[in-house]
Image: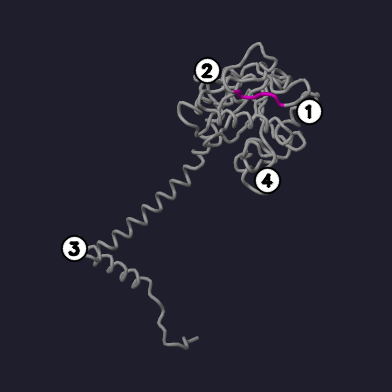
Amino acid sequence: MPNPTNDKPVNANSVNKSNQGMLDKFRNLPNDSPQKIVVVTIILCLTCSIMVSSAAVLLRPLQLSEEQLSKRIEILKVAGLYDEDESINSLFNHIETRIVDLASGEYVTNIDPDRYDYERATREPETSVEIPKNQDIAKINRSAKYAPVYLVKEGDEIKNIILPIYGYGLWSTMYAFISLQADGKTVEAISFYQHGETPGLGAEIANPQWQQRWVNKQIFDQQGEVRLRVIHGAVDKTSKNAPYDIDGISGATLTGNGVTNMIRYWFGERGFGPYLAKLQQGA
């Protein structure tokens, strides 16, 4: 059937030749030609933008895995399992990670511990709860509904319980892992792995010598009340409070108060208190 219009079919070969002609004209322009400079600049900018964007996307999983690796090292240290000559992932196989419902103290079985992003969960409204101001002694504003716990076992028996805790000091949020003995109330070790406290003062919370003073301290008294605290000055070893007291850091009273409040929050009813109570009851 004849073409009712006067349009002629497009010839692909003629288009290619036209494009080729334009490229030849562009290449033949002097290098200092304004048109050539503008076009080359635009091409370079686009190429660099694509490369930077691609690098950011491709490297993000690596950055996340490095952050996770760093935390695993801290967990292994408080568990007494760290060996710099051994593979971190291999050593971490000795630790069982579980997810706990903080409200009930029960283990959660429908969340993959290896994929659970705890820090993100503390920020998202659907996975966290706002803490009433009169109960937010750790000054963290929101708390995730579910938190990871790390268990070191000998056979089927729990040897150590490692908990992630955090709270505000003088200048920053302080993050730590604390390891408890199997009774769920005696400190085995602690590691403050991230903070922004004053160097030489509050930053001494990361000093291994100060952290060593936590070993064998008791978190709860006989009535189950949280008693562990950082005091002002040195501990009086003859005092009835000695099992619960940690030496204060000179010149860092507010940081020490922040640590105390962090402990009281996370071992209370809104933190890991219900979970530890169930463990002690053998539930």
3D distance between C-alphas at marks 3 and 4: 65 Å
State the residue position of label 3.
30
Mark 2 element type = helix
Image vertical order of residue 236 relative to residue 131, above or below: above
Q: Earlier in the sequence, mark 1 or mark 3?
A: 3
Q: Residue 257: percent from the left, percent from the top?
A: 60, 30
Q: CA distance from mark 4 to mark 1?
A: 24 Å
First in sequence: mark 4 vs mark 1 = 4
**Element type at marker 4?**
strand
Residue 253 image offset from top left, x and y in percent: 55, 28
In the image shown, does 200 or 115 lie closer to the viewer? 200
- For mark 2, what is the residue? 209
Side of 200 relative to 23 (left or right): right
- What's the distance in space between the residues labelled 1 and 2, CA to CA? 33 Å
Residue at which label 1 appears: 278
Identify which residue is drawn at 47% across, 42% down: 59
Q: Residue at x 58, y 29 (%)?
A: 176
